[in-house]
Image (cartoon, grey):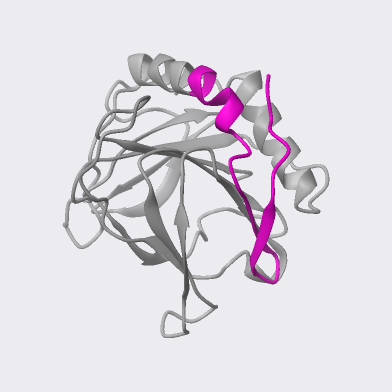
Amino acid sequence: MLFAETDSVEIAPGAVLFRAAAEGSAEALLREIENVIAVSPLRRVTTPMGKSMSVEMTNCGRAGWISDRSGYRYEALDPLSGKPWSPMSGMFSELATRMALLAGYQHFVPDVCLINRYSVGSKMGLHQDRDEQDFSQPIVSVSLGLPITFKFGGLRRTDATRSVVLHHGDVVVFGGEARLAYHGVGTLRRGNHMMTSEFRYNLTFRKI
């Protein structure tokens, strides 16, 4: 599997952006995304407040992140099928572990990958990733396809945010004091990417 030598940018203490780090493996990653979708199709989940998220999502690994009127949580079975989620491939796990190590986080082995697909108009508001049990473990986020603006803030929703544009193959790793930072992305604009058409995919690796 190809992982590019890449420039790194510190977004905040504990958060690092690696430019184009996954670009060389993008084709294989997208094939694996299609394999996961074949087992657990993309769907739009509902927030506890009853609002439908604009992003389509699915999961692979030992559990999947879901949201409904009961709240946010991880479940071992896909609620659409009642069956286990697709196993996480070695390629996915290897990428996440390698990128975490480059960011200074040793021994990270993800057991869950959230797969989000953004279409024109999709966005993700500021939020914390806090449904996991061990916040000493980092988050590894991989962007594929159309560019989008990534916003990274502090430990309070009202803290100032820094904005950077994420491009195809970029990888963001955040942990340590940045592990519970509020973050989100702006609205996906219309475009056409040679590998993903009008979409952006985001892989988010976690240890739950």
94 relative to 107 in the view: left or right: left
Q: Residue at x 40, y 62 (%)?
A: 184
- Can residue 109 be seen here? no
Nearest the eye: 160 or 25: 25
Q: Residue at x 37, y 24 (%)?
A: 195
Q: How many marks?
A: 0
- Quadrant placement of the N terminus: top right
The magenta segment: 1-29
How far across and how far down the image is residue 197, in percent?
A: 27, 28
- In the rendered structure, does residue 139 fall within the stretch colored magenta? no
How far across and how far down the image is residue 153, in percent?
A: 50, 74
- 202 versus 89 height, above or below: below
How far across and how far down the image is residue 2, in percent?
A: 68, 23
Q: Residue at x 54, y 78 (%)?
A: 155
190 relative to 162 in the view: left or right: left
43 relative to 24 in the view: left or right: left
Nearest the eye: 111 or 97: 97
- 29 versus 177 height, above or below: above
- 14 versus 7 height, above or below: below
- Quadrant placement of the C terminus: top right
Nearest the eye: 90 or 77: 90
How far across and how far down the image is residue 65, in percent?
A: 43, 42
Q: Residue at x 29, y 35 (%)?
A: 199
- In the rendered structure, does residue 22 fall within the stretch colored magenta? yes
- Can residue 73 be seen here? yes
